[in-house]
Amino acid sequence: MQPTAWDFQNQLMAILNGARQSGEPHIDVESGHLHTQVGEDPNSNRISVCCEVMRKMMRIGDSIVNEPPSGEGATLMIRYIV
């Protein structure tokens, strides 16, 4: 079964909460890594859903560290302030 936007959002929240509990000021999340954590090959067609969720979860202060030329791909990296 392919992961849904909810699956990516849930995993990203777990990553952010873990960083917050560890006292980290920020965490860099790469879309390919997040995609793999939900059990999907980062080269699949679901990477666009993963990237969309990552962007939607950005808040003031968060920033894009690396963006692939197309805007979506396994190398999208966002720094979330926790």
Image: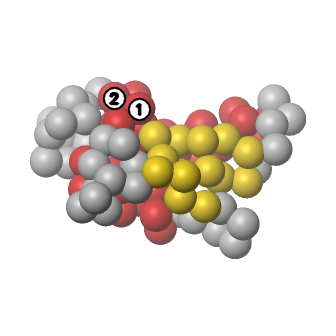
**Left or right: 48 in relation to 52:** left
Front residue of 81 and 8: 81
Whether residue 48 is visible here, answered yes or no, is yes
**Left or right: 17 in relation to 74:** right
Q: Quadrant of the N terminus?
A: top left
Front residue of 69 and 54: 69
Query: Do labels 1 and 2 touch, CB within 8 Å?
Result: yes
| Vertical arrangement, residue 43 with respect to residue 61, above or below | above
Q: Residue at x 40, y 55 (%)?
A: 67
Q: Position of residue 33 (x, y in %)?
A: 41, 32
Q: Secondary structure at mark 2?
A: helix
Alpha carbon of mark 1 to alpha carbon of mark 2: how far?
A: 5 Å
| Vertical arrangement, residue 38 with respect to residue 72, above or below | above
Residue marked by disc 2: 36
**Left or right: 74 in relation to 21:** left
In which quadrant of the rendered view does residue 16 lie? top right
Residue marked by disc 1: 33
Q: Residue at x 35, y 36 (%)?
A: 32
Residue furthest bottom as drawn: 60
Q: Residue at x 74, y 45 (%)?
A: 26
Whether residue 10 is visible here, answered yes or no, is no
Front residue of 44 and 1: 44
| Vertical arrangement, residue 45 with respect to residue 41, above or below | below
Identify residue type, mark 2.
Answer: Thr
Q: Residue at x 60, y 61 (%)?
A: 63
